[in-house]
Image (cartoon, helix red, strand yellow):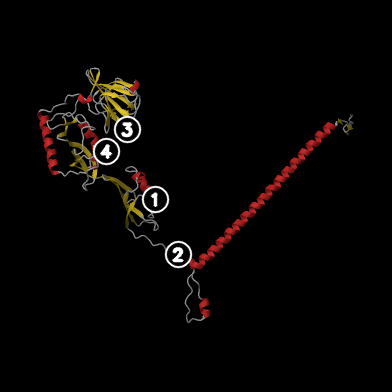
């Protein structure tokens, strides 16, 4: 197959392949030009349609608005006058009053000066409540800024009430604030007053606080904690009482239905008898069957406070009988069938069942010997109190921060938290008392007594005890009986 050659005026020879290449390029350019032309016309068509639709929408809105205004004017138009003896021509010639002006009554003004009691509700701020009474917004913000160095109004809680006083100002549309009073707490009131130069003076007024004795208690028909709180004993005081009696009382085994608790404590209050807080427990008594235990609070000359029995003997002993509050004994000391191993094994401690995370207290002053994982004990703490006594605490969920070998701890200090680590079937504290290196039954250990008061300090203690006895004979005891919980 042969191909002919073509001549061009320039004298060059072009092959058929080059001709096809040139034609393809021109065709491609032509297609691209048509594409641009089509895109242009498409965009113009879209713009036209959108403009048309928008115009129709605007026309429809305008038409609906005009129709609504006509209906509103018809409803607001005054009623036609009743027929009179006046000729029809005269009636028709009478001017028609403006309907809209007749239908818009003038807003009644606020009678000033005025006072209001306002309450903070959900979503309210001091600024919103002030502007709601027509106070100018810039003045409302100025009031907030003036108060912040004494009390930040952003901390106002729902239900807080305050007094607001308004009067006339230069602007007839906005009254001015002449005074503001916020009761922040039973002990503190913040007041704001307007001065002659239009500045504000903010003051904090603290209510005087008085201290008196109060009494609470009752018969125990449930747990000691529940009976105490329901009879009016503040929870923080109950923990202090339990701590004071824990040297002599096993709160799981020793307390029975019909036992009673009675305390005298300090109560702070205002001149309106509003409780402002509580002070110290001055006296506590537990009646356990035919046994009565009493403690009095006494502060030594060197400033250390403690609890003493009626003889002036400190109730603090070497070790606590129960190093955990609100727990129940789930397993005692002695031989038992091991719940996991399935055979009889000596249980060398006492198990106290309690919720995970319940604090575990040091049974006495001492030095940490071990703190960490230890086989079947799980998380374990061992505390040395003297050359003779040590205590151990097993199955803790975690060890308290700062507890490590060599650290000195005080009696009642939190050293760990109840858990179920190691060989354990449920959350509890395994507590051991170790005497001369051997575990012994905690229930059988007799601990030495504490300090005995003497001399002038003993005389001071007896004087304090007599004052408490006078209070016991004159103060009524608030009581509340709680239902017995099933054991």
What whole-number distance in Å separates the C-alpha atoms at marks 4 and 1? 54 Å
Please tell me in which quadrant of the rendered image residue 307 appears.
top left
Answer left or right for 468 relative to 276: left
Q: In which quarter of the image is the C terminus?
A: top left
Mark 4–mark 1 contact, CB under 8 Å?
no
Lower position in the chain sequence, tag 3 or tag 4: 3
Taking the image as drawn, is residue 74 in sight?
A: yes
The residue carrying mark 4 is 486
Which circle marks residue 128 in the picture?
A: 1
Lower position in the chain sequence, tag 2 or tag 4: 2
Helix, strand or loop for disc 1: helix
The residue carrying mark 3 is 355
Residue lying at 41% horizontally and 62% vertically, measured from the top left: 107
What whole-number distance in Å separates the C-alpha atoms at marks 3 and 1? 47 Å
What whole-number distance in Å separates the C-alpha atoms at marks 1 and 2? 27 Å
Which circle marks residue 104 in the picture?
A: 2
CA neighbours of label 1 inside 10 A, class few (<14), some (14 to 19), many (20+): some
CA neighbours of label 4 inside 10 A, class few (<14), some (14 to 19), many (20+): few
Which circle marks residue 163 in the picture?
A: none
Helix, strand or loop for disc 3: loop
Relative to 6, is 67 above or below? Answer: below
Answer left or right for 70 relative to 297: right
Lower position in the chain sequence, tag 4 or tag 1: 1
CA neighbours of label 2 inside 10 A, class few (<14), some (14 to 19), many (20+): few
The image shows residue 477 at horizontal and vertical percentages of: 17, 43
What whole-number distance in Å separates the C-alpha atoms at marks 3 and 4? 18 Å
What whole-number distance in Å separates the C-alpha atoms at marks 2 and 3? 69 Å
């Amino acid at each position: 197959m042969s191909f002919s050659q073509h001549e061009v005026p320039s004298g060059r020879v072009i092959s058929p392949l080059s001709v096809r290449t040139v034609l393809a390029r021109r065709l491609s350019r032509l297609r691209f030009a048509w594409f641009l032309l089509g895109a242009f016309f498409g965009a113009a068509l879209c713009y036209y349609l959108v403009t048309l639709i928008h115009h129709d929408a605007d026309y429809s809105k305008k038409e609906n608005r005009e129709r609504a205004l006509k209906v509103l004017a018809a409803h607001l138009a005054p009623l036609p006058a009743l027929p009179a003896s006046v000729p029809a021509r005269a009636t028709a010639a009478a001017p028609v009053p403006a309907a809209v002006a007749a239908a818009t009554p003038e807003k009644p003004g606020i009678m000033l000066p005025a006072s209001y009691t306002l309450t903070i509700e959900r979503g309210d701020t001091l600024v919103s409540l002030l502007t709601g009474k027509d106070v100018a917004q810039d003045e409302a913000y100025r009031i907030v800024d003036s108060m912040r160095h004494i009390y930040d109004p952003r901390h106002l809680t729902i239900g807080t009430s305050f007094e607001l006083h308004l009067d006339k100002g230069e602007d007839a549309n906005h009254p001015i604030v002449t005074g503001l009073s916020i009761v922040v707490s039973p002990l503190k009131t913040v007041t704001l007053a307007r001065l002659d130069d239009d500045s504000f003076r903010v003051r904090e007024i603290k209510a005087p606080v008085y201290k008196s004795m109060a009494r609470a208690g009752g018969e125990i028909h449930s747990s000691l904690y529940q009976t105490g709180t329901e009879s009016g004993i503040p929870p923080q005081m109950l923990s202090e009482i339990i701590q004071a009696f824990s040297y002599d009382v096993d709160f799981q085994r020793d307390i029975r239905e019909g036992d009673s608790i009675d305390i005298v404590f300090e109560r702070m209050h205002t001149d309106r008898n509003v409780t402002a807080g509580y002070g110290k427990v001055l006296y506590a008594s537990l009646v356990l069957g035919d046994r009565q235990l009493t403690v009095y609070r006494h502060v030594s000359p060197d400033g250390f406070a403690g609890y003493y029995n009626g003889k002036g003997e400190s109730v603090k002993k070497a070790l606590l009988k129960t190093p955990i509050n609100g727990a129940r004994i789930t397993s005692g000391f002695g031989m038992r069938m091991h719940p996991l191993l399935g055979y009889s094994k000596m249980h060398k401690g006492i198990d106290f069942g309690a919720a995970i995370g319940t604090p575990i207290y040091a049974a006495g002053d001492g030095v940490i010997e071990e703190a960490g994982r230890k086989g079947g004990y799980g998380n374990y703490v061992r505390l040395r109190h003297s050359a003779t006594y040590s205590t151990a605490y097993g199955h803790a969920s975690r060890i308290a921060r700062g507890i490590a070998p060599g650290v000195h701890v005080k009696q009642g200090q939190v050293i760990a938290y109840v858990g179920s680590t190691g060989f354990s079937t449920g959350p509890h504290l395994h507590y051991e008392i170790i005497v001369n290196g051997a575990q012994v039954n905690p229930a059988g250990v007799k601990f030495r007594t504490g300090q005995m008061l003497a001399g002038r300090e003993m005389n001071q203690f007896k004087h304090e005890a007599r004052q408490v006895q006078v209070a016991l004979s004159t103060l009524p005891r608030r009581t509340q009986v709680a239902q017995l919980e099933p054991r």
